[in-house]
Image (cartoon, helix red, strand yellow):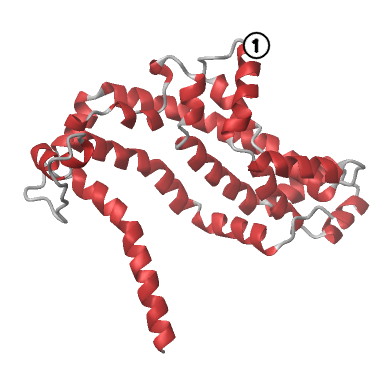
Amino acid sequence: MLKRILCLTALTLLALFTWWVLWFMVMGALTPEDELLATIGPALEDSGTKNAVWCILPSWPTLQPLVQLLLDTPVFFSMFWNGCRLVFPQVLGQILMAAPAAWAFSKLRFPTRRVLYAAYLVLMVLPFQITMVPNYLVLSRLNLMDTAFAVILPGMFSTFPVFIIKKGFDAVPDLLLEAASLDGAGPLRCFVSIGLPLGLPAILSAATLGFIEAWNAIEQPMMFLKDKSNWPLSLYLSNITTEDLGLAMVASLMMLAPPLLLFLAGQKYLERGIGLSGSMNDGMG
């Protein structure tokens, strides 16, 4: 019983520490601008003559920053649309590219399968800073710099969705595919009629993770999009000054809303996909 109480207490403290960030943003969005400048403003100044404090509840809640963002900040909606224009085609392309590749690695047998899958795993762990220069050179040669395709195309060929979806396809029984082959179903028919329905949790899991990563991406659009009119919402907060702290809090909540709603809607599939990737071996054999 003592161990259980200690474990529950530790988990509760960790949960409160995580939720404190959301509470910080929500209360900051309801706090008047002058109060924000007086409480957390010193932490953003270089002088360091005052100490920053934070009140759990605002002295006088207000919706003025929300009204300012929704009614008086047209650039916010422009960058929100830019984010949707970059993220949704990118995630759709990831699924279209990753699902057939994952099926091939999982169910097809060809000589270089292990080598290619090992190369995929290596590419998956490479950070963006390593692939940035090759992507920049290719996009520049194709005259795609400063266009939406400069962010969409590299994101479409991400290797991480292949890894997630392959784990879902590994769970498809081989006996079921053999029975379908005996009934006259070819490889494409097996993939469409059996692989995609049974691997749907892994596909939705990869789509959810891909959306969250693409929605919060900063380095890719900053590197490949020079014109600020093409910037997505992830680069909006960097343009807000310390005089607009309330606007920054509200914008942070608005940016958090789409990934949070998608995560809540696909949480069941995300848990199943992560469970498959953690409970099975790497499938290279």
Rendered residue at 23%/30% (across/down): 70
Rendered residue at 51%/36% (across/down): 214
Residue 113 x/y as whole percent: 85, 43
Is 154 situated left or right of 14 in this image? right
Name the quadrant containing residue 209.
Answer: top right
Q: Is residue 281 visible?
A: yes
Placement of the C terminus among the 4 image quadrants = bottom right
Rendered residue at 57%/20% (across/down): 149
Name the quadrant containing residue 255.
Answer: top left
Rendered residue at 38%/82% (across/down): 5
| Residue closest to the eye, 244 or 63 | 244
Residue 271 x/y as whole percent: 55, 59
| Residue closest to the eye, 15 or 192 | 15
Q: Is residue 66 visible?
A: no
Considering only vertical position in the picture, is 79 above or below 8?
Answer: above
Outermost residue on the left side: it is: 60
| Residue closest to the eye, 21 or 97 | 21
Residue 167 x/y as whole percent: 70, 54
Count up the numbered dots.
Answer: 1
Q: Which residue is mark 1?
A: 141
Is 265 situated left or right of 103 in this image? left
Q: Amino acid at mark 1?
A: Arg
Q: In what element is the residue under mark 1? A: helix
Placement of the N terminus among the 4 image quadrants = bottom left
Judge the density around disc 1: few (<14), some (14-19), many (≥20) Cα neighbours within 10 Å: few
Name the quadrant containing residue 243.
Answer: top left
Residue 79 x/y as whole percent: 37, 25
